[in-house]
Image (cartoon, helix red, strand yellow):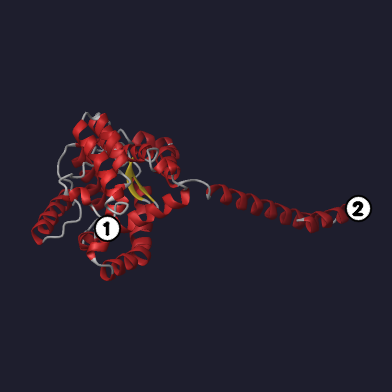
Amino acid sequence: MQDAVAHWGHQVTGVIDFPELWRTWGIIRRELATDITIRRRDLTGMVSRKHYLLAWALLWPLAGSAAVEATHQVATGPGGAVDPYESINRLSWELNYSYLDRYALRPVVHSYVEWVPQPVRNGVGNFTENFNEANYFVNNLLVGRVVDSGTSVLRFAVNSTFGLFGFVDVAQDMGLERRAMSMSTVLGKATVSQGPYFMVPVYGPTTMRDAIGDTVDGLYFPYASMGWGFRLGLWAVDGLDSRSRLVQQEAVLDNSLDPYGSAKDFYLQYEEAKVQDGRPKAALPSGEQQNSDDGALDQYMDEID
């Protein structure tokens, strides 16, 4: 950049060559733009996953006034969910499903399922889930489930000590069942609708209610005392574990006429089932359950055809 400025000064002191001046100004302008881009990238790297998710959910509706108006025109789904930004969401889905999942995540997940024994995978899931027990303690209190709240405290204490930091679910063997309760579910029980549905690049599906709930859950202990590096690693491990539980469901989406619509419908139903104290549809290993899930998908596909 200094060379460009010096060249500019030489032109001014001599005979003015306007084409040369214009070329030099172009060099300066490009270098300034490059410097600004680098600084912007550095700042972006400082944003945490939770802040990124919340910012995405809050700022996306500002994409245009027409999109805001669309929220009043789209039919509501489970829990009052709407999808007014479907065109943008489908682009994100194409990135996530057709590229990131198919060529990056799916090979890793299949290798993980094939080479890592089931007991070890269960331990990984127990370890990541153990960090949520503090959330369940507070959130169960908020909905008046005092016994479940106490159970969550006992589970965290037992599994964090005798369960080798949560890898072994000793509390389960003692009859202390997990009483999961996210802030999103608490909001749902308070009649807060799911709101706009978002397909976030890399992160995956969420709604306005889920984004706010996840952000609040991230403020509890022990997440609040974690460094961003550890939290990012924990998020990656939890994502790997969650994705590995859906391997048997891949054929359902791969053979679907509208994978985006199917994934959205099942996600919204899963989240709303937790609010209604129903049994959410997760990865279903048995053949009977698999057929039941396929039947629900076929019914849904018949409705949208």
Residue 4 on image: x %, y %: 78, 57
Give the SS element for disc 2: helix
Q: Residues within 10 Å of mark 1 (few under 14, many from 20)?
A: some
Q: Residue furthest left?
A: 288
Q: Position of residue 265 (x, y in %)?
A: 22, 47
**Above or below, comparing residue 208 to residue 263 in the picture:** above
Left or right: where does residue 153 sit relative to residue 13?
left
Query: Type of residue at label 1?
Result: Gly
Q: Callout 2: few (<14), some (14-19), or many (20+) C-alpha neighbours within 10 Å? A: few
Whole-angstrom CA distance, mark 1 to mark 2, is 74 Å
| Farthest-out residue, front | 162
Compared to residue 170, the image places residue 104 above or below, namely below
Q: Could you tell me if residue 187 is visible in this image?
A: yes
Can residue 19 be seen? no
> In the rendering, which numbered label is found on residue 13?
2
Which residue appears at 29% of the width and 52% of the height? 166
Amino acid at dot 2: Thr
Residue at position x 30%, y 69% from top? 111
Task: Give how far across and how far down residue 276 sits, in percent.
Answer: 17, 37
Tag 1 residue: 123
